Image (cartoon, grey):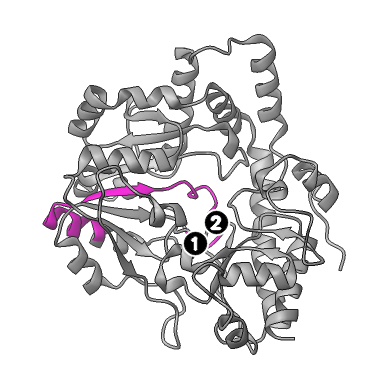
Amino acid sequence: MTYDVPEILGDLSIPALRSSGSMKWSMFPEHIHGHETLPCFVAEMDFTPAAPIRQALTRWAADGSLGYRDPVLVEGFQRVVRQYFSTVGLEVSDDAFRPISDVMTAYDVVARLFTPADSPITLMTPAYMNFVRHVFSDQRRIQSVDMLAPDELHDHWRIDWEALEHAMLAGGLLVLVNPHNPIGKVYTRTELECIAELAQRYGVRVFSDEIHSPLVYDGHRHIPFASISAQAAEVAITAWSATKAYSIPGTKAASLIFTNPADADLWHRHAAHFEMGTASSGYVATIAALDHSQEWFDAALEQLDTNRGLFDELVAHHLPGGCYLEPESTYLAWLDLRSTPNYAKFATLVTEHRSLADITAQHSGVVATDGVETGASGDGHLRINFATAPAIVEQIVTRLGAIYAG
């Protein structure tokens, strides 16, 4: 089938993608066991970043200092991130937005600075892989609360409230990924209000990772956790970056948003040096993204919406037994293979050192993220990035169909 892709998103042919220098297209050989490699594992878009971003970076590299950060860049970064959050309902001052290199660094620092060393980290699984496997220097215990998957009575992912409350009895840090990676869930106001009430009741801090929040599809709305109530603002520390939504993850700039004045004071006294790890290129790229790249973003989101629907159609046609629920946000497909005709055969090949994703790659060339990396509840699943050319999405699903249903 022939697909039209907006020119503004760049050349999405496989040769062009292989020559782009991205980790996604250069980490694996061009062929795996005779199959052309189709990488769909890491969460970065194949879309060429917006022209205003590339132009701003070119000007900065040619004319600006490559030394430590310019305060003017920091102020511009804080301004545009504040303006973004204002559009989604969180009103705080520019100074509440503190730069940091990336969300994973933020996760580590927030846990160690704002919660006791003997308290647990609670993840709602399946969860972002790096949150699951991260090892804290103070040896934090990570505990999981499995989300409730869609079933014959429910067409959406739900929180297991009893299990979540039990986990929060021990205090510590709850990691709220909203929108949720990998299942693409956008949390409702009622759900966020209940989380805030439980956090207040049991003295739990909430690390709200909202990095995918610009990528919400029609029919859903992102609500910043800290905007829900005074309770939520008190317990929340929010992390955000433009890198996922604007295809600029290599520029390294994120933000922590402090809505509790005591947290901001503690940060300034003990952790402000982490702000120096943010790259000046990240400031430049983020400012250009949020100030000048709306046309590109609109085209990207529309293409992602098309791709998520295409993925659904392809699974229905090529992968009987495969279970995929269109995500409410993100560009990640969470694919359950356990009911496909050939799943049992491939599952018997899984070992401690050979995952279902490894086996899938060897038999099809499709390099996805193994569901087990997101927690035990991800067994039998693959996380697949569909932020690419529709023709590549079609190849990915048809190849999966050939081995799991052929």
Q: Quadrant of the C terminus?
A: bottom right
CA neighbours of label 2 inside 10 A, class few (<14), some (14 to 19), many (20+): many
Percent position of residue 282, x then y: 54, 28
- The answer to whether 280 is drawn above or below residue 11 in the figure is above
Of the pair 165 and 90, the residue shown nearer to us = 165
Percent position of residue 260, x then y: 22, 36
Q: Mark 2–mark 1 contact, CB under 8 Å?
A: yes
Q: Is residue 30 magenta?
A: no
Which secondary structure lies at badge 2? Answer: loop
Answer with mark 2 or mark 1, whichever residue precedes in sequence.
Answer: 1
Q: CA distance from mark 2 to mark 1?
A: 8 Å
- The answer to whether 133 is drawn above or below residue 159 in the figure is above
Of the pair 265 and 81, the residue shown nearer to us = 265
Q: Is residue 204 magenta?
A: yes
**Residue holding disc 1:** 182
Q: Toward which corner of the image does residue 87 lie, by quadrant?
A: top left
Q: Toward which corner of the image does residue 105 lie, by quadrant?
A: top left
Relative horizontal placement of residue 163, taking residue 80 as reference (left or right) = left
Which secondary structure lies at badge 1? Answer: loop
Q: Which residues are magenta?
A: 195-220
**Residue holding disc 2:** 330
Relative horizontal placement of residue 6, taking residue 334 as reference (left or right) = right
Q: Quadrant of the N terminus?
A: bottom right
Residue at (45, 88) in percent of width and height: 152
For discs 2 and 1, the disc positioned in front in the rendered view: 1
Residue at (34, 42) in percent of width and height: 108
Q: Does residue 129 appear anywhere in the picture?
A: yes
Percent position of residue 36, x then y: 80, 62
